[in-house]
Image (spheres, rainbow, N blue to C red):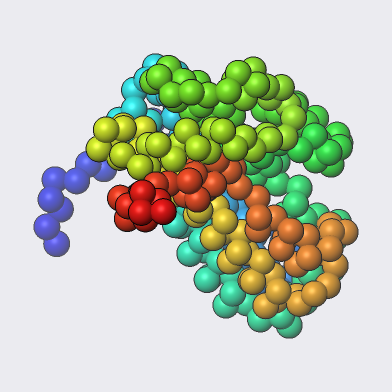
Amino acid sequence: MKDYSLTVPKKADLTYNSYIKVHELLDLQKLESDPPQHDEMLFIIIHQTYELWFKQILHEFNKAVDYLKKDQTVLMLKAMNRIYKIQDVLVSQVDILETMTPNEFNYFRDKLTPASGFQSHQFRQLEYCLGLRNETYLKFYKEDEEAFKILSKAIQGPSIYDEFLKFFARKGLDVPQEVLNRDYSKAYEENDDLAKEMAKIYDDPLKYNELYEVLEVMMNVDQKLLLWRYRHVQMVRRVIGITMGTGGSMGVQYLQSTLNKLAFPEIWKARQYIITPVTRDKEEEV
């Protein structure tokens, strides 16, 4: 067999396993079921990989915010497009989880109580980074000191949408002062005048090409999050039906209530104010 001059590592050398921490990683799947249920391994691995991808998304969001602050639009777009591609992976992982039947899940479901995906502090942090702020969620993390500290800090600072609106204003667009000076810890309130200002960009994307590209990449990320939420709801409904979740939530009913969460509401609402050449001609005729 030809060796292609591959290096045989010495004991002290950095190797793939030591760099990636493969042995430690493979030791993290601790089943609660006894006797061990085959599908619990899949359930744990899926959720562990979700947490790893959430970590990477948060890493990219931080970079995207830095780029926005420096008006480095091209690099911001690159970071946001990477997030969008990662979201594709998150959505596709639902397909894998759906290979588990209701009975297969029921064999170990009772062992999960009161744990719940609702308790994922990284997903909550991701929502806070987008601008989806809700102080009431913090109480669910008071017993997890590290998670509570992370989320308490995240809810106090500007979201990526807040930074985008500052960028928007620096580019000469009219952003209401009450939007720029808002209390970051509170839920964002949609502003109709801002939606109309964004509509100007969509009305003339060649003139405002830079802002148009930023609006669209943010829309892509927001829409993909909604798609993931929808796929998650349907997967849960397929596996457990309309029953209470392991963490005490209303399960499918709670998840369905999240399907209308928009991180960037004015980007969506701007569509109804866009004046295309066709509609403009009709208005002039009237």
Q: Is residue 13 visible?
A: no
Q: Nearer the viewer, residue 75 or 275?
A: 275
Q: Is residue 122 above or below residue 90?
A: above
Residue at (48, 46) in percent of width and height: 273
Q: Is residue 184 visible?
A: yes
Q: Is residue 86 above or below residue 168?
A: below
Residue at (54, 46) in percent of width and height: 269
Q: Position of residue 183 (x, y in %)?
A: 71, 22
Residue at (78, 65) in percent of width and height: 253
Left or right of residue 262, residue 281 in this image: left
Q: Quadrant of residue 235?
A: bottom right
Q: Nearer the viewer, residue 219 or 82?
A: 219
Q: How many marks?
A: 0
As drawn, which residue projects farthest toward the front?
A: 286
Left or right of residue 162, residue 276 in this image: left
Left or right of residue 102, residue 98 in this image: left
Q: Quadrant of residue 251?
A: bottom right
Q: Position of residue 57 (x, y in %)?
A: 50, 40
Q: Is residue 2 above or below residue 129?
A: below
Left or right of residue 284, residue 263 in this image: right
Residue at (66, 66) in percent of width and height: 233
Placement of the N terminus among the 4 image quadrants:
bottom left
Q: Position of residue 129 (x, y in %)?
A: 60, 34
Q: Position of residue 174 (x, y in %)?
A: 48, 23
Q: Nearer the viewer, residue 243 or 182?
A: 182
Q: Quadrant of residue 153?
A: top right
Q: Nearer the viewer, residue 21 or 57?
A: 57
